[in-house]
Image: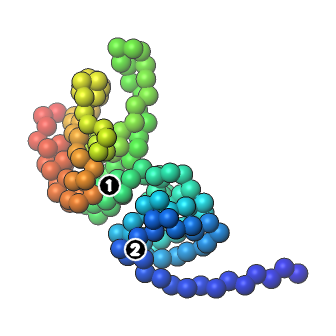
């Protein structure tokens, strides 16, 4: 007979800094809202009250069954969800480019008022360039109504305004 003893401790890590924390082997159920995951060693999964969990993969966050790449994506997903907007995060799209058929990823593919838009989150190291502008035009030529880039910092700090602005812009695009 194999008996395991489980000890459950409820902890609120809201605003906690988990930089350098080694949580391998730990099984935590906690409020991780606003927690700084920093350089935490996350060999095992952390399940959070908000249905957000960190995966062992670098910069991968499981939010309601979707794998998101950043805190900014989580914040935008939460607002889109709260506004009952139909969206698909990290969509793989296949389209024709001058180099032939290629796969491209959209941070958020958003359906709003019978229109399809792409919300792209630019990290500090990636800003739209000529190639990215050409790719946006290819999306539009393929039937996407709007492709709009937002800075990751703004998405994290003002997700309500980002989503509101995106949805307003998408609703004003002529079909």
Please state which of residues 90 and 153 is positioned toward the viewer in this rendering.
153
**Looking at the image, can residue 139 be seen?**
yes
- Secondary structure under badge 1? helix
Residue 7 drawn above or below residue 66? below
Tell me which residue sits at (37%, 19%) in the image.
Answer: 96
Callout 2 crowding tier (Cα within 10 Å): few <14, some 14–19, many ≥20: few
Going by the picture, which residue comes out furthest to the front? 20
Tell me which residue sits at (84%, 79%) in the image.
Answer: 2
Q: Earlier in the sequence, mark 1 or mark 2?
A: 2
Please provide percent x and percent y for residue 83: 25, 61
Residue 132 falls in which quadrant of the image?
top left
Please state which of residues 85 and 124 is positioned toward the viewer in this rendering.
124
In the image, is 21 to the left or to the right of 138? right
In the image, is 100 to the left or to the right of 147? right
- Calculate the distance from the C-alpha at mark 1 to the C-alpha at mark 2: 18 Å
Please state which of residues 105 and 72 is positioned toward the viewer in this rendering.
72
How many numbered badges does the structure rendering display?
2
Q: Which residue does the numbered mark 1 point to in the structure image?
A: 72
Tell me which residue sits at (29%, 24%) in the image.
Answer: 131
Q: Which residue does the numbered mark 2 point to in the structure image?
A: 16
The N terminus sits in image quarter: bottom right
Tell me which residue sits at (12%, 34%) in the image.
Answer: 174
Residue 23 falls in which quadrant of the image?
bottom right
């Amino acid at each position: 007979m194999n008996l395991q003893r489980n000890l459950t401790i409820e902890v609120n890590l809201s605003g906690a800094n988990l930089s350098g924390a080694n949580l391998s082997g730990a099984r935590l159920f906690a409020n991780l809202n606003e927690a700084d995951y920093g350089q935490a060693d996350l060999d095992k999964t952390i399940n959070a009250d908000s249905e957000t969990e960190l995966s062992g993969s670098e910069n991968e966050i499981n939010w309601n069954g979707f794998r998101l790449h950043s805190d900014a994506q989580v914040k935008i997903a939460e607002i889109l969800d709260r506004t009952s907007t139909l969206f698909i995060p990290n969509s793989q799209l296949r389209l024709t480019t001058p180099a032939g058929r290629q796969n491209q990823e959209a941070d958020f593919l958003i359906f709003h008022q019978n229109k399809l838009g792409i919300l792209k989150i630019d990290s500090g190291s990636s800003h739209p360039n000529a190639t990215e502008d050409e790719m946006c035009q290819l999306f539009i030529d393929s039937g996407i109504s709007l492709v709009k880039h937002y800075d990751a910092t703004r998405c994290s700090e003002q997700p309500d305004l980002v989503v509101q602005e995106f949805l307003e812009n998408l609703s004003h695009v002529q079909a």
